[in-house]
Amino acid sequence: MKFMKLGSKPDSFQTDGNNVRYVVSELAKDITVIVGDVKFYLHKFPLLSKSAHLQKLVTAAAGEPNDEVYIPEIPGGSAAFEICAKFCYGMTVTVNAYNVVAARCAAEYLGMHETIEKGNLAYKIDIFLSSSIFRSWKDSIIVLQTTKALMPLSEELKLVSNCLESIAMKASADVSNVDWSYTYNRNKLLEENDNNPNRNGVRNRSVPKDWWVEDLCELEIDVYMRVIASIKSKGIVLNDVIGEALKAYAYRYLPGFSKSVLRCGDLLKYQSAVATIVWMLPSEKGSVSSSFLSKLLKASIFLASGDETKDELVRLMGQQLEEATVSDLLLRAPDGEATTYDVDAVQKMVEIFLLQDHNTEIESLEAGNELEEPRGAGILSDATKLMVAKLIDGYLAEIAKDRNLPSVKFIDLAEMVSGIARPSHDGLYRAIDMYLKEHPGISKSDKKRICKLIDCKKLSADACIHAVQNERLPLRMVVQVLFFEQVRASASSGSSTPDLPKGIKDLTSGSHGSSRSATTNPEEDWDAVAMAEELKALKGELASLRVANGRGGSERNGVGKNGIDKAALSKMKGMLQSKKLFTKLWSSKGGGYGENSSSDSSESLGSTNQEEAKSTPSRNRRYSVS
């Protein structure tokens, strides 16, 4: 820490009790200066020779008993006045980063300028500040912290602005030129030194680009905001470093923030902190992680910070939704709502995410690029969209457990990502099955609408086994699952698909781009299907095939684990070739069941569903495991 010593005479100030200060001298004291509740018994000459303000006060107090002078409003109080008085006496006094602002403000208040005497206190402190304090990283931060208690005078003297400029310049310096002392996370230091605590980390590592982050976390939020604004104004520090700084500050300033559970405290203080941090967040995508944005959003909801703060965080999360996890999206519903989670906020995120492609196309047109070849996609890649689709599938599975969740919210959110092609619909199937399980009273029209989102061709073998035994699914959907499983089995064995009725063929031909394009009566009874006994028998045959194969069935013809025993396959083909069965199943209701088109690659639902399907006591009974 930098410091400056003034004067050469020994310090002869003495204390008599808590509220009396006097100078040990043979000369009689001829002035009493009262600062707050402290009395200073001093001499006029050394004080008046350097303070214009005391000259005026003494002149005004002429004739008063004991020549008492009152200065209750001096900045820094009695401690700052004592520094000024010792300087007037020429006594040794030390000025450092902790008291320099108070001393400078007191000197200004007392009028200790060059016009009164050359080399006066105000001038010497200004030299010390510019030559030492503002050149030191940590001293500049300490001084900035002390300016808050001395507003507005410290602002008028440009002490605050000089501190901000000094800190911003150093934080923006090339890391190769950083050679001053600073604090750095010890865990990061150990990682960079191969977790060897015996190595000299300061000498054996390069300066990290976020070296300054931790030192600024000690500042109060209003001061911190001004520092970050000054750093950003330089335009040198990268946005991700600014984001890292804000993250470190939130973790330090908001107790419990790291666990998304804020502890009780000063509500207004924390509200202001969250709103300020959000206001300072860089607008560029990827500057901060989705996890950090989620924690801020959960904190703002807990603190009731207001719609403006919440909307901005929702917007930022929507821009980089592919980076989020399901837990990031599990936001508490607003007070007064019966639901557990805030589904509306997640819907808004998905809308913002999908609008990025749309906005890109509009910007292209506005720029006069109408004649250019149209792009197949906007700024969002297929992989990015797929990540969001899987994310929403997982989120739907979580919110499906909420029995107070209206079906319209669940369905609307699922439909928002239905246009995103994904190789497997296992996740969507799991979410829908969970919702049907927790909401047995769902209307048939809603059940039809929600089940249409599932593409049966994209269900894995394990999911198909689960689906054909699922009592909650409409029978018409089960027919599709059975058919596509047979197609898959036929393709695996090298045989051709049997000749089927037109209603079944329609499932594999034509456009199925949108499940909502089906022209069926929304109130029709899907479960009233003829030949239910034959359908159950067919399901049983398929389950037997799959389970037998899972227990170590034949791996002939290079099919491996997914191979199907030829005898069982022949039996299945024979059943499917019976036009009578499928004619009865489809003639009464007419038409197929729409799906989303894409490739037929798939993913497994997981070992849980497979094991439960294999352990079914009776394969002629439909059930679901969620």
Image (tube, rainbow, N blue to C red):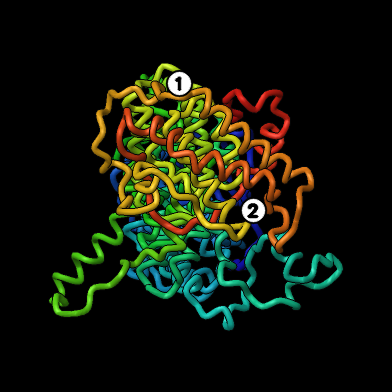
Determine which residue is flagged by label 2. 12
State the image coordinates of residue 133 (x, y, percent, origin top left): 52, 69
In the rendered view, tell whether residue 405 sits above or below residue 191: above
* Residue 224 appears in the picture as rendered: no
- Amino acid carrying mark 1 in the image: His
Q: Residue at x 46, y 24 (%)?
A: 531
- Image quadrant assignment for residue 11: bottom right
Q: Residue at x 32, y 67 (%)?
A: 377
Q: Are marks 2 and 1 in contact (CB under 8 Å)?
A: no
How many angstroms separate mark 2 from mark 1 (CA)? 85 Å
State the image coordinates of residue 518 (x, y, percent, origin top left): 27, 40
Position of 128 compared to 334: left or right?
A: right
Q: Residues within 10 Å of mark 2 (few under 14, many from 20)?
A: few
Position of 35 compared to 547: left or right?
A: left
* Residue 466 appears in the picture as rendered: yes
- Image quadrant assignment for residue 155: bottom left
- Amino acid carrying mark 2 in the image: Ser
Which marked residue is nearer to the observer: mark 2 or mark 1? 1
- Residue 439: numbered disc: 1
